[in-house]
Image (spheres, helix red, strand yellow):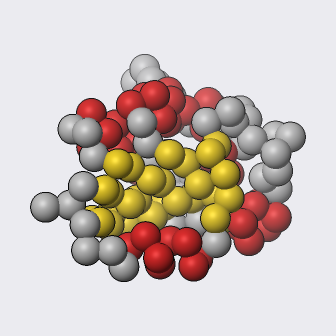
Amino acid sequence: MADKIVFMLLNLNPDHPGTLGTPFFQAAVAAAMDLEVEMYFAARTTRLLIKGEAERLYPGSAAEKSVYAFMQDAHEAGAKFFACAGAMDEHGLNPDNAIPELDGARGGGAFIGEIAEDSVAVLTY
């Protein structure tokens, strides 16, 4: 059984927020189950790490809970957030405008190194 779950957020589109709640909800559940959780934000998903971006997005039409609130739940449960270093420049993310939950930047080698471990499960979105 895996003791760590790595989420790769690559294909999600912040322009379609209906898809954005699930990975953070699942990350919060995994962390609550005492699994180590890392979330890698790549491509356009790095925009979610810019202050104010995820706060204005709602995954449901009722607009009851923002994407940022889902992100906060996951982070508070223990999930770590890492931005793709290359995508940061491309999408305007920097230390000055990043949300406080951002735990750092990592490249593709770090992601591949993590998922190559036998005790790690990987989910991609």
Judge whether 124 appears above or below 54 on screen.
below
Q: On the rendered image, what quadrant is the C terminus found in?
A: bottom left
Q: Furthest residue to the right?
A: 96
Q: Residue at x 55, y 48 (%)?
A: 81
In the depicted view, which residue is nearer to us: 116 or 122? 116
Does residue 97 appear left or right of residue 85 in this picture?
right
The image position of residue 101, as x and y in percent, is 61, 36
Q: Is residue 74 visible?
A: no
Q: Which quadrant is home to the N terminus?
A: bottom left
Name the one closer to the observer, 76 or 58: 76
Occupied quadrant, residue 92: bottom right
Residue 32: x and y, percent? Answer: 27, 33
* Residue 55 in view here: yes
Q: Residue furthest top?
A: 64
- Comparing 51 with 13, the one in front is 51
Question: How many labels sit on residues?
Answer: 0
How far from the left and from the top, in percent, is residue 46? 65, 56
Q: Residue furthest left?
A: 1
Q: Is residue 75 left or right of residue 46?
A: left
Picture quarter containing residue 106?
Answer: bottom right
Q: Residue at x 68, y 58 (%)?
A: 105
Residue at horizontal 48 percent and vertical 35 percent from the top: 75
* 93 sits left or right of 34 in the view: right
In this rendering, the answer to whether 10 lies above or below 81 is below
78 to the left or right of 111? left
Q: Quadrant of residue 27?
A: top left
Residue 108 is situated, as x and y percent measured from the top left of the image, at: 58, 77
**Residue plotted at (57% across, 79% down):** 109
Image height of 79 relative to 11, above or below: above
